[in-house]
């Protein structure tokens, strides 16, 4: 549903001198808002822009970057950072820019892979936000939800309150779309069983708990010392709901 974003300014000239962060990889990129005004705005005094909710969230996320960058805590400013080579930084930026182009062309699958590689080379809140947005667009709701929450946590640590709020709003919007997988294990049998989901261990605390999962094929495996391993594959449809997989008692080897 379209939303209205109301921008207040004394004059278009004043607005054009105002700078806001572009939704870039980190906190360095800024753009003059007159480009936005020329593209989206017609009235000089009280400006009303009709935008989609996703576009509005992205805009507000970028605006929060400006505010947050001015209020970093000493701990955030002094935190040690992993050394990144110039080549990796250049590659990360190139991948990020290509991802944005692909996303604008609705080539979301390819865009996601570019953002993923850019984030691997050099992590940044801007990259993560675009990646989470991309995940949501392709239906990877669990990945999008988890990443928006991670962005919110990082923004909170950087004292970027507005940016944290936008990320939490995006996570809340994705939550009703989540698909959850519940794995039940017969604990009464006394067997010491190790359970895996797609190769990752599912700890006992997760047994019986609905955990968000992306659509697609997933493998559930159970094994133990002196026990015959058991496994199954399930195809999770892109439909919100709860899916339960019950691990049977394992046979002795």
Image: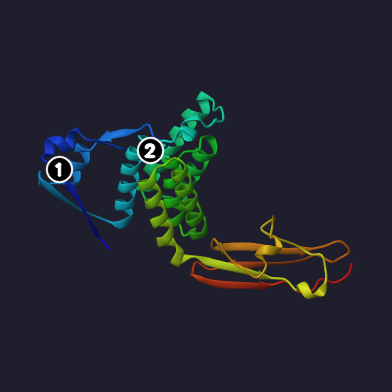
Quadrant including the N terminus: bottom left
| Residue 95 circle label | none
Q: Mark 2 — residue?
A: 24
Q: Residue at x 83, y 69 (%)?
A: 191
Circle 2 Cα neighbour tier, 10 Å, few/some/many (<14 / 14–19 / ≥20) = many
Total marks placed? 2
Q: Quadrant of residue 70?
A: top left
Disc 2 to disc 1, how far (Cα)?
A: 25 Å
Q: Earlier in the sequence, mark 2 or mark 1?
A: 1
Foreground residue among 82 and 99: 82
Q: Is residue 57 above or below residue 193?
A: above
Query: Measured from the top left, where is residue 221 in percent x and y?
Result: 73, 63
Q: Residue at x 28, y 34 (%)?
A: 31
Quadrant including the C terminus: bottom right
Q: Is residue 245 above or below residue 112?
A: below
Query: Measured from the top left, where is residue 145 in percent x and y?
Result: 48, 57
Query: Measured from the top left, where is residue 112 in percent x and y?
Result: 47, 47
Q: Mark 1 — residue?
A: 9
Q: Is residue 45 something one can see in this rendering?
A: yes
Q: Quadrant of residue 223?
A: bottom right
Tag in front: 2 or 1 = 1
Foreground residue among 1 and 216: 1
Q: Is residue 180 above or below residue 35?
A: below
Q: With 226 as the anchor, is 26 left or right in this view?
A: left
Q: Residue at x 81, y 71 (%)?
A: 250
Q: Residue at x 53, y 35 (%)?
A: 121
């Amino acid at each position: 549903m379209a939303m209205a974003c109301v921008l207040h300014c004394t004059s278009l000239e004043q607005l054009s001198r105002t700078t806001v962060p572009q939704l870039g990889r980190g906190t360095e990129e800024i753009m003059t808002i007159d480009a936005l005004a020329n593209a989206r705005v017609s009235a000089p005094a009280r400006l009303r822009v009709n935008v989609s909710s996703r576009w509005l969230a992205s805009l507000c996320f970028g605006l929060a970057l400006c505010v947050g960058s001015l209020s970093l805590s000493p701990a955030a400013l002094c935190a040690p950072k992993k050394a990144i080579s110039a080549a990796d930084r250049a590659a990360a930026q190139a991948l990020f820019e290509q991802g944005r182009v692909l996303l604008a062309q609705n080539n979301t699958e390819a865009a996601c892979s570019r953002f993923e590689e850019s984030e691997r080379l050099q992590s940044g809140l801007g990259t993560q936000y675009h990646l989470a947005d991309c995940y949501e667009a392709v239906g990877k709701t669990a990945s999008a939800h988890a990443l928006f929450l991670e962005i919110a946590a990082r923004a909170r640590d950087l004292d970027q309150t507005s940016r944290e709020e936008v990320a939490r709003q995006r996570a809340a919007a994705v939550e009703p779309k989540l698909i959850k997988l519940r794995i039940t294990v017969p604990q009464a049998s006394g067997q010491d069983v190790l359970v895996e989901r797609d190769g990752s261990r599912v700890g006992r605390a997760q047994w019986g708990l609905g955990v968000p999962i992306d659509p697609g094929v997933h493998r559930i495996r159970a094994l133990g010392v002196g026990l015959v391993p058991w496994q199954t594959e399930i195809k999770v449809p892109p439909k919100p709901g709860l899916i339960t997989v019950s691990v049977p008692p394992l046979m002795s080897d």
